[in-house]
Amino acid sequence: MEAINWMNEVSKRKDAIIRDTQNILRIKSVLDEEHTSPEAPLGKGVKEALQFMLELGEKDGFTAKNVGNLAGHLEFGQGEECLGILCHVDVVPEGDGWSSDPFAADIRDGKIFARGAIDDKGPTIAAFYAMKIVKELGLPLNKRVRMIIGTDEESNWRCVDHYFEHEEMPALGFAPDADFPIIYAEKGIADFDLVQKSGEVQGSNNHKVEVISFQSGRRYNMVPDYAKAVLNTGNTQTEVLQEFNEFIKQHDLKGKAFVDKGEFVLEIEGVSAHGMEPDHGKNAGLFLSLFLSSLNLDQRAENYFQFVSKYFFNDSRGKGLGISYSDDITGSLTINVGKFTYTRESGGQIGLNLRYPVTTNMDETKKQLEQKTAQEGFELQNFSDSKPHHVDENEFLIQTLKKVYEEQTGEAAELLSIGGGTYARSLKSGVAFGPLFPGRPDIAHQKDEYIIIEDLLKAAAIYAQAIYELAK
Ligand SMILES: [Zn+2]
């Protein structure tokens, strides 16, 4: 058989690819829990985008199936096994500051601008045309090829949860929802709270400062950029103020101290960052905790702020807790303290986001965490865990995708591991494969999100060859 020129096949369909990409981008498929119905459990826009894909496929002779109005699939080919391509058509809210209507899909400078252009509607259309090319060329296949379309990737993954409860798990697959070349390993991700045990708190440790309340951060997976404490400083206000100003200067932070309704308020501004690398930010909650722990506090506050400072300040690797660990595949375990709350009446808690290497013994790690924090008067609660994800680099899936990527781009297909979680982890044997090429800025979830048309077409060619080589 003559070698197929995949890029040529894509070029023949270029206008249709751009048109369908624009059409799906014009659907405002943001989760809308306020306007739901059994036919549209995640809102009208999301359902419309799912329907768009199912109709697109049906028109071209794919078997289309709506699975509970939460997900769906398009399938062609024959065989015992199934190759899965996992996409999603929901998008995060558009946010502010756009240069053009975020749902107009305007083309400027060879780019299509819209919410969802790169994440993940553009790649969904690229993968759809890739399937269509393989189908139209009438190439012999040994596997069925199935595009699975999710509609809740940006929020709670109710789509894939529901889908895989009712439909088969593909033998292998990829998700065009992250970076090229290939993401073959993802850390495990655990969220949990450490809650201060109530116990007896003696009122009289001759303290000078009482912490009335303390708050910082709202999400487990973000480094908080703001923290606020309300204090009763008695007759030590001048002293505290002076020490606070020195602290702020010493750590190069922005901070404010003022009196509000007779209470002394301290605020610190830090630098936000994604929780997968806490060292990229400046945790406002940890800095303010460190400062507070240096004061002569009431007992309950002293226990809380000393615990937080001792185990988490300047230690994002779990050394103090005795759970630090790293491996060659995914690097180091990381801990982000994303939420802090404390009140004089009920004590405090922190919310943590732990990302752990693929070879971590999580049972041991959790046990150690429980023991260590119990000694300090804290209790582990609300533990939720998404297991690490890893496909061996010698597997057919990875070897094949590597070969395809190298042939199509002329670049080495380096295997990537990340601390974040991609959609691929909902597949048993799946990797994230594109669509963002190395060196391109990551504009997903940002204002003026776009996809470069040339990249969209190149991705379609890569996916087409990948589908053929994996399913033939
Ligand atoms: Zn995505």
Image: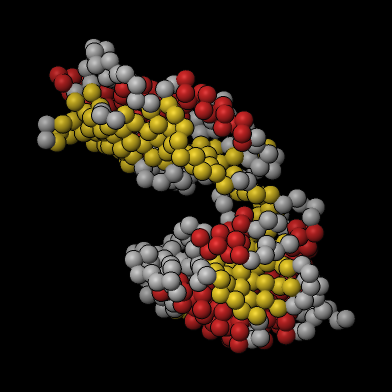
Residue at the image position 78 percent from the left and 84 percent from the top: 138
Which residue of the protein is positioned furthest toward the right in this rendering? 1
Residue 353 visible in the snapshot: no
Image-quadrant location for residue 130: bottom right
What sort of colour scheme is used for the picture?
A: secondary structure
Quarter of the image for the N terminus: give it.
Answer: bottom right
Q: Does 235 sit above or below residue 132? A: above
Counting from the top left corner in percent of width and height, residue 370 is at 51, 28
Q: Does 37 sit above or below residue 351? A: below
Seen from the viewer's position, the closer of residues 152 and 103 is 152
Counting from the top left corner in percent of width and height, residue 278 is at 48, 40
Seen from the viewer's position, the closer of residues 377 and 280 is 377
Q: Does 428 sit above or below residue 290? A: below
Q: Does 108 sit above or below residue 156? A: below
Residue at the image position 39 percent from the left and 40 percent from the top: 339
Residue at the image position 45 percent from the left and 61 percent from the top: 445
Counting from the top left corner in percent of width and height, residue 280 is at 48, 42
Image-quadrant location for residue 240: top left
Q: Give the side of residue 396 with respect to residue 356, left or right.
A: right
Counting from the top left corner in percent of width and height, residue 74 is at 63, 76
Quarter of the image for the C terminus: give it.
Answer: bottom right
Seen from the viewer's position, the closer of residues 125 and 37 is 37
Q: Give the side of residue 219 with respect to residue 368, left or right.
A: left
Residue at the image position 55 percent from the left and 44 percent from the top: 385
Q: Give the side of residue 252 with respect to residue 388, left or right.
A: left
Q: Give the side of residue 384 with respect to residue 8, left or right.
A: left
Residue 220 visible in the snapshot: yes
